[in-house]
Image: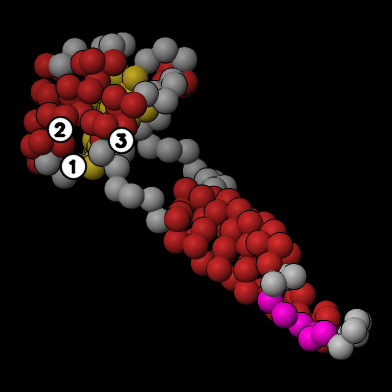
Amino acid sequence: MMRGMLGVFTELDSTVEAIEELKQKQLGEVTAYSPTPRPELEQAIDPPQSPVRKFTLVGALSGAIFGYWLAIWGSEYWPLVVGGKAISTWIPYTVFGFEVMVMVGALSTVFGMFYLAGIPRLTTTVGYDARFSASHFGVWCECAPEKLAAVESILRRHGAVEVRGER
């Protein structure tokens, strides 16, 4: 039983047109492969907003709180009394809190990207061909078995060099 259709293209314009028609007719989930990042493909795919930003926000806020807490805890645990001033105030610890916020926010962003991308991927990606890393463009459409013929005709009509079903 086929999971979808793969079309191999040599021209960017025909690839974009095929993607747009597949998206317009809502035949299935469309994935594009390209040897280089192309804004035309990204605009045609119209991906949803990335949830990685939520990892960054939570990590940055946690880092800022932890940075302030660590600085205040250290000054309370080992007090250095100078001229009767307060031992722990937030103003001198802002730089340290900011630095920890940036560090933890960056690390949580990297973790979020790896987690959401499924890295490390232990199996090969369905629909990927080695030519997509060199000179060709690819369109993978995962769809129901009864829609395979419509997807194949769209890919062929837009000039796919090769069209094949994948499992």
Residue furthest toward the front? 83
Indicate the position of residue 155 as horizontal and vertical percent values.
Answer: 17, 22
Sequence-first disc among 2 and 3? 2
Coloring scheme used: secondary structure
At a point 37% along the width and 24% down the height, the residue shown is: 38
Report the residue at 34% width, 19% height from top: 137
Q: At label 1, which amino acid type do we have?
A: Gly
Q: Is residue 166 visible?
A: no
Q: CA distance from mark 1 to mark 3?
A: 10 Å
Q: Residues within 10 Å of mark 2 (few under 14, many from 20)?
A: many
Which residue is rendered at x = 72% and y = 80% of the image? 89
Between residue 61 and residue 27, name the one nearer to us. 61
Q: Quadrant of residue 16?
A: top left
Image vertical order of residue 67 relative to residue 116, above or below: below
Picture quarter with the C terminus: top left
Instruction: Please give the residue where the numbered disc 2 appears in the rendered image.
Output: 22
- Residue 55 coordinates in the image, percent (x, y): 50, 61
Residue type of the residue flagged with mark 3: Thr
Q: Secondary structure at mark 1?
A: loop
User: Which mark, by number, is residue 31?
Assistant: 3
Q: Which residue is mark 1?
A: 28
